[in-house]
Image (cartoon, grey):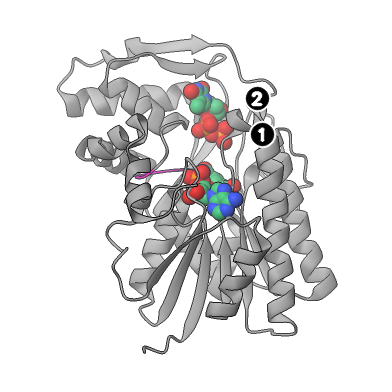
Amino acid sequence: MHAYRRNIVITGGSGFIGSHVVRLFVNTYPDYRIINFDKLTYAGNPENLRDVENAPNYVFIQGDICDAAAVNAVFEEYTPDGLIHLAAESHVDRSIEGPEAFIQTNVLGTFTLLEAARKHWKDRTDVCFHHVSTDEVFGSLGDEGFFTESTPYDPQSPYSASKAASDHFVRAYFNTYRIPVVITNCSNNYGPNHFPEKLIPLAITRIQEKQPIPVYGKGENVRDWLYAPDHARAIDLVFHKGKRGESYNVGGFNEWSNIDLICLLCAIMDRKLGREPGESQQLITFVTDRPGHDHRYAIDAGRIKAELGWEPTVTFEEGLERTVDWYLANTAWTDHVRDGSYRDYIRRQYKEE
Ligand code: NAD
Ligand code: TYD
């Protein structure tokens, strides 16, 4: 049997960002065994990983991070040297509709993983628990200023409150039990495999089908967008070289109001679909605002740049072009998600609850 130099567990690897992280690690580190531990909720889609699922250094385990027995079994079987934790409920609107699943997975699930790390890693210092979090834990900015690593936590939605709670537990396990941890707090991601409930993939599919594009409120809210493969590169760097016990902000240096972003997307898609300039913009429909809608997120990513040399490699215009091209070339992916048949694939490959 191949002896791998390191065993790395990635939770939530079948989701949007997780699939980019799994792909990067499987391809970059053939001497690591990558164990993707994912429950395959509605957001988990094995089609995201078709290109690496047969790689010799890739293992998939369907499991729930809240299930201590299943998590301990992974630690016992693979003796992981590192854990990169992305599994989460990730959609703010869903957290407003039903916060409980967010507390369950994001808080209790993270706690369950930390407990397993404490039990199995004991005094090991050569291991790393990398917690992947969001800039939304810092709350909402006015028109000026940026989130830094020392910005006080001020989460406003059930989603961000659950992520903030999990960040605090991760720090507490470093301070109390000396588990080597790192945290990354990243801004909004976009790119291939993004579940079409989120703004950018939702708008792409609506434009394709000439359906209304729902813009909350006046579309004046601002987000800082980062191409997901660039986030995966940041995770790779911080996992390997980040100072243990510390956190790093990751962002795109790329702020857009929702309305300007949608107009840019409409222009790109008009061109690609051979429509008249301005045609898709007519699909924009202003709808009731999200309750407690955070006004602005903007990351100061100066620390990761100065200490680890990380910068985004893909400009927003380039990343959006690539993302639109991916969705136009992969209509089957969206169709399977929307008609539910991606669950058939899961049923065939793995056990369905
Ligand atoms: P996603 O919703 O696309 O994927 C989540 C994945 O976690 C899915 O594969 C799902 O099956 C899995 N999962 C959910 N509950 C689970 C459980 N109980 N046990 C095991 N697996 C479970 O999420 P995403 O957008 O890829 O986000 C990944 C991580 O990055 C999350 O922790 C999120 O908070 C964080 N993050 C996301 C963004 C963003 O813009 N999407 C930005 C910053 C940070
Ligand atoms: P989203 O993609 O849900 O990410 P987050 O809430 O985590 O930032 O939303 C991005 C922005 O787009 C946010 O300001 C809410 C807004 N939005 C809309 O205007 N319409 C939509 O249909 C959605 C899903 C989001």
Quadrant containing the N terminus in the rendered view: bottom left
Mark 2: which amino acid? His
Q: Amino acid at mark 1?
A: Glu
Q: Which residues are magenta?
A: 186-193
**Residue at image x 47%, y 40%?**
42
| Disc assigned to residue 175 | none
The image position of residue 233, as x and y in percent, is 45, 62
Residue 7 visible in the picture: yes
Q: Nearer the viewer, residue 135 or 17?
A: 17
Q: Is residue 312 above or below residue 214?
A: below
The numbered dot on residue 144 is 1
Q: Residue at x 49, y 67 (%)?
A: 236
Q: Which residue is mark 2?
A: 293
Q: Tell me residue 19's x, y (percent).
A: 41, 55
CB at mark 1 closer than 8 A to ligand 2?
Answer: no
Check the image and name the residue furthest to the right: 176
